[in-house]
Image (tube, grey):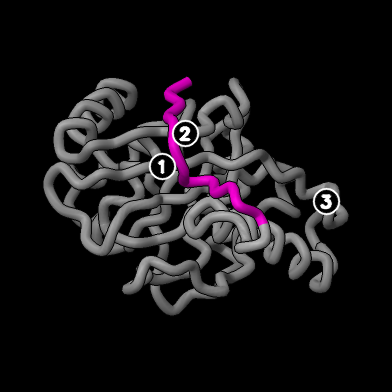
Amino acid sequence: MYYFCKALVWIYMHIAYKLRYKGRKNIPKRTAVIYASNHRSYADPPLVGAGGRGKYAFMAKEELFKNKFFSLLVRSLGAFPVSRGKGDTEVIDRAVEKLGQKRSLMIFPEGTRSKDGKVGRGHGGAALIAARSGCLIIPVGIVYGDKLKFRTKLQVIYGEPIDPAEYVEIGDEPNPRQLVRLKNRYMADIKRLVEGEPEKNSETVTGGGTENE
């Protein structure tokens, strides 16, 4: 069911938008990773997921699991419930557990959708999960104009993998300062994918050409 649904999403997204994926060669095969993406619309999870590899795990509101049929469906697709009001520790534990089950995790570090398309400062949840799991982080940029509508030109760009071991000691109690360094790295990469290189560099990530590897 999982791969059938994923194929349907792929087809639908290419019908709904003029969609191009770039950098898929940067996604490792046969291993779980953490996709850290900018956040612009409700369509972001399927957009990022359709171009990725393997199976995913998603965080979803606990209320979505009250209906038994829908609960069975979303669980089969990798969703797990997140309870409001409970501490972040349980969520982090579940995320690390899912990665250990070879399901990649999708995270939007900004925590909310961007209204102007620019990348915000971001939070450190992905850094903590990466530090505890040792999984690579794949920065992702979702790039399009002001509004997402039918047949909008859109690119999803997968950046080069970030090895958390280069920034933080892998373990259950990582150093907070090291986590900040890791967070700054993936947020900088996301920003570069979305907004291009700094002005001193004439080349931009979002310029010309396509890659659908």
Which disc, if any, is residue 156?
A: 1
Crowding at dot 2, Cα within 10 Å, few <14 / some 14-19 / many 20+, comes out as many
The main secondary structure of the magenta stretch is loop
- Where 28 sits versus 147, above or below? above
* 2 and 1 marks in contact (CB < 8 Å): yes
SS at mark 1 in the image: strand
- Amino acid on which disc 1 is placed: Val
Crowding at dot 3, Cα within 10 Å, few <14 / some 14-19 / many 20+, comes out as some
**Magenta stretch: residue 175 in it?**
no
* In front of the other: 172 or 131: 131
Determine the residue positioned at 60% across, 56% down: 197
- Amino acid on which disc 3 is placed: Ile
Viewer-nearest of labels 3 and 2? 2
* 3 and 2 marks in contact (CB < 8 Å): no
- Left-right relation of 191 to 137: left
- Left-right relation of 21 to 42: right
Crowding at dot 1, Cα within 10 Å, few <14 / some 14-19 / many 20+, comes out as many
Mark 3 or mark 1, earlier in chain: 1
Please state the horizontal and vertical placement of residue 173, each as a whole percent of the image: 81, 63
Please state the horizontal and vertical placement of residue 65, each as a whole percent of the image: 26, 54
Viewer-nearest of labels 3 and 1? 1
Residue under label 2: 22
Q: Quadrant of the N terminus?
A: top left
Mark 2 or mark 1, earlier in chain: 2
Gap between marks 3 and 1 measured at Cα? 29 Å
Residue under label 3: 170
- Left-right relation of 213 to 174: left
Mark 3 or mark 2, earlier in chain: 2
Determine the residue positioned at 77% across, 49% down: 164
Where does the magenta region start and end? 201-213
Determine the residue positioned at 61% across, 63% down: 199
